[in-house]
Image (cartoon, rainbow, N blue to C red):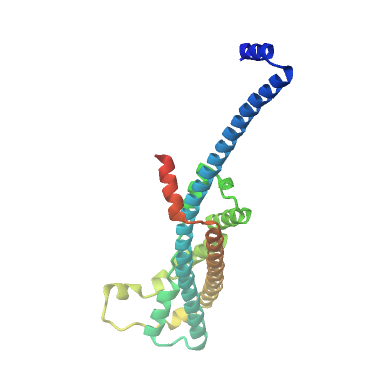
Amino acid sequence: MIGEFRVRLQRGSPYGFLLWAAGEIFVVVAGVLIAFGLNAWWAERSARIEEQTHLGALMRDFELNVGVYEEIMGRAQRSADASLELLQLARREPTADPAMVRALLGAVFSSYRKKPVLDAYEALVSSVGLTLIRDEKLRAALAGFADRASEPYQEQFSDRIYLEFTARYLGRLQLAGAVARDAAPLESFAELLNDPAFQEHLAYRYVLERDVAGLYADRMIEARDILALIGGQLEEPEAYATELEDSAE
């Protein structure tokens, strides 16, 4: 390169040499800028494809979460309704038909919990982190949902009270005959229903499960809102999945 500079300087005018040198520098600088631009474009494209893949997985998980919360919300509400109905029956008519009481007891002493699906969220956090999701509002919504779902204090408190309730009254619920399918008539539940402590437990069971059902309703709405945010960011997921496969090859 230096030798060529000398030859051109000796053969031509200084002005022509300067034009030639400027042209050479321009070509080199342009090549470097184009290379940087291509690298930046490829990195952005790869990040976008990866983001879309994670968004697709999050979409599937939160579609499941809406169903999860619909189910456990309905079950919690049924337990709360049965607790209130049995409490009212106990205070109004403790000698009510034992078959009616048993049906209500079955709903009161029933508990069902199910964890939300956070597989895609946890995979995202453990691999590249939430920074891959470009939408700040979606990142905050995902982190908040995961935090509240992982530490369900209100739900755990209700479960602890329920277990104490069950342990205290388990021997007085006439479950043996139901399990053994005994044809003998049921005994009256009047003594149990007249127990003030049992009535207090029923009242507490109603309040806690009603609040848990409300909590689940809020989580279901939150999951739907996150689904809407994901849908706003998800662009042709099938096309992006194809691009990801091509780039991996």
Report the residue at 57% width, 50% height from top: 133
Note whether residue 116 is visible. no
Left or right, residue 43 beside residue 113: right
From the viewer's perspective, is 21 left or right of 174? right
Q: Residue at x 63, y 53 (%)?
A: 136
* Percent of width and height locating residue 49: 49, 47
Asked where in the image residue 105 lies, by quadrant, the reply is bottom left
Image point (36%, 75%), residue name: 174
Q: Is residue 166 left or right of residue 140?
A: left
- Report the label total: 0
Residue 34 position by quadrant: top right
Residue farthest front in this picture: 12
Q: Is residue 135 above or below residue 216?
A: above
Closest to the observer: 15 or 173? 15
In x, y percent, where is residue 95?
A: 44, 87
In the rendered image, which quarter is residue 36 located in? Answer: top right
Q: Position of residue 161 (x, y in %)?
A: 52, 65
Q: Which residue is nearer to you in this view: 164 or 77? A: 77
Whether residue 38 can be seen here: yes
Say which quadrant the N terminus sits in.
top right
Q: Is residue 23 above or below residue 172?
A: above
Q: In the image, is residue 75 above or below residue 101?
A: above
Task: From the top left corner, tell me how far across and down residue 91 is, in percent.
Answer: 52, 85
| Quadrant of the image containing the C terminus | top left
